[in-house]
Image: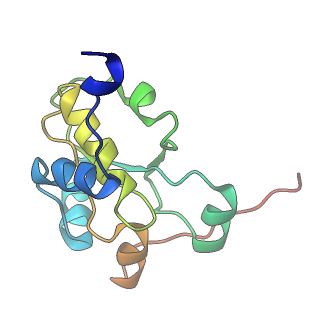
Amino acid sequence: MGLHQALVTRTVDSLLAEARAGLTRLTPEQAFDAWQGGALLVDTRSSDQQLEQHGVIPGSLHHPLSVVLWRLDELPRETRIVLICRHGYSSSLAAAQLQQMGFTEATDVEGGFEAWAAAGLPVAAVVVSDR
């Protein structure tokens, strides 16, 4: 059997469903409560323009998806981590990867940053400096 025959074709929807099956996802309000209780809230949005346009969660960490696994790898595996992206899709995939790395308390926010803001939870404007 050749390498190509061993590969299984999967869709992003099937990967997302598998990732979410292993997560206890949080509503924005539950994520806020977890954060207030000591969980690490990590914003994975990568576009500076998106951050400037929509704001940030004051006090959250910002690690874009391209580096979030490396940035969090140094933390103790018992750290409770809540990821948030724009809509709550890519954060689910990243949270599942964190769980595979041993972060059993990793999860994400249903609906992402947009649901967080719509729920009236804290959002701060990004101060744009002269570039």
What residue is shown at x 24% (from left), y 47% (from top)?
39
Up-down: is 120 above or below 1? below
Up-down: is 34 above or below 10? below
Viewer-proximal residue among 104 and 119:
104
Extreme residue toward the right, this view = 131
Q: Quadrant of the N terminus?
A: top left
Residue 53 percent coordinates (x, y): 65, 72
User: Within the image, what quadrant is residue 5 found in?
Assistant: top left
Up-down: is 103 above or below 85? above
Q: Is residue 48 left or right of residue 21?
A: right
Residue 41 percent coordinates (x, y): 34, 50
User: Within the image, what quadrant is residue 109 found in?
Assistant: bottom left
What residue is shown at x 19% (from left), y 35% (from top)?
99
**Residue 93 shows in the view:** yes
Up-down: is 129 above or below 97? below
Residue 84 percent coordinates (x, y): 37, 57
Viewer-proximal residue among 90 and 115:
90
User: Within the image, what quadrant is residue 32 found in?
Assistant: bottom left
Q: Is residue 59 left or right of residue 15?
A: right
What residue is shown at x 58% (from left), y 51% (from top)?
46
Residue 103 percent coordinates (x, y): 19, 32
Extreme residue toward the front, this view = 1
**Residue 83 shows in the view:** no
What residue is shown at x 29% (from left), y 58% (from top)?
13
Q: How is the image coloured?
A: rainbow
Viewer-proximal residue among 102 and 15:
15
Q: Is residue 85 left or right of residue 101?
A: right
Total numbered circles: 0
